[in-house]
Amino acid sequence: MITGDGSVRGVAYCIAIPLPQGKRAAVTSATAASRSDHTTSLRERAVLKVLHSAASRYRPGWLTAQPEDIAHRAYEKLRPRLDAGHVLEDAYLRRTAYTVCIDLVRSERAELRRRQSWGHPAGERQVSPEAAASARQVATHIADCLDALPETRRRVAVLYLQGHGATDISSVLEQPYKRIENLVYRALASLRKCLTTKGVAPS
């Protein structure tokens, strides 16, 4: 309202000025783009939240990369599908985060082996060439035996040897806990039998 002294109180004025057709289209386009950016931002945060949770669960404690790093790496792998408008289930997001974890584990272990080949830090126990060769041979036998397992048992055995329990494996593979427990038992039994035939006595 306008008071006696000419001041304005309690009223918000909006003056409607007609815009040319082109400018109206530009304003509409800008508004739509703003809404799209907001929707994308919300979707990105939701996806990153799932990826971060999965990364925190599957990341080994000794891994240099933090859950935030893993989540963003996984998001970049998923970006083409997300930008294309695909709706990705949480289980698929978790598997992607797990895959990134495995890639980082392999990369970090390879880097560690490379550094160790340059020499041993002071105070570290030296490993004889014979012992190193024996360890490599055992690793080769384990890899061969894993490759010989049926696909499902192989996946279960690899996850188990990486330190994941039946509960985690059940979540990753989306299989009932009891089935995973049974698969772990059978996979390890097959692995022991295979290694024994190769002259390796697993504990």
Image (tube, rainbow, N blue to C red):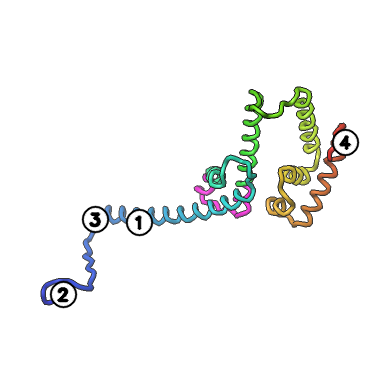
- For the record, the magenta segment spans 79-95
Instruction: For the residues labelled 4 and 1, say whether their Cβ atoms are less than 8 Å apart.
Output: no
The reply to whether residue 80 is visible in this rendering is no
Residue at x-position 12% and y-position 72%: 6
Q: Answer yes or no: do the residues labelled 1 and 2 have beta carbons within 8 Å?
A: no
First in residue order: circle 2 vs circle 4: 2
- Residue 20 has which mark? 3
Q: Give the residue type at disc 4.
A: Thr
Horizontal and vertical percent position of residue 23: 27, 53
Mark 1 or mark 4, which is nearer the start of the sequence? 1
> Which quadrant would the N terminus be assigned to in this image?
bottom left
Marks 3 and 2 sit apart, C-alpha to C-alpha, by 32 Å
Tell me the SS state at disc 3. loop
Decide: marks 3, 2 in contact (CB < 8 A)? no
Secondary-structure class at tag 1: helix
Nearer to us: label 1 or label 2: 2
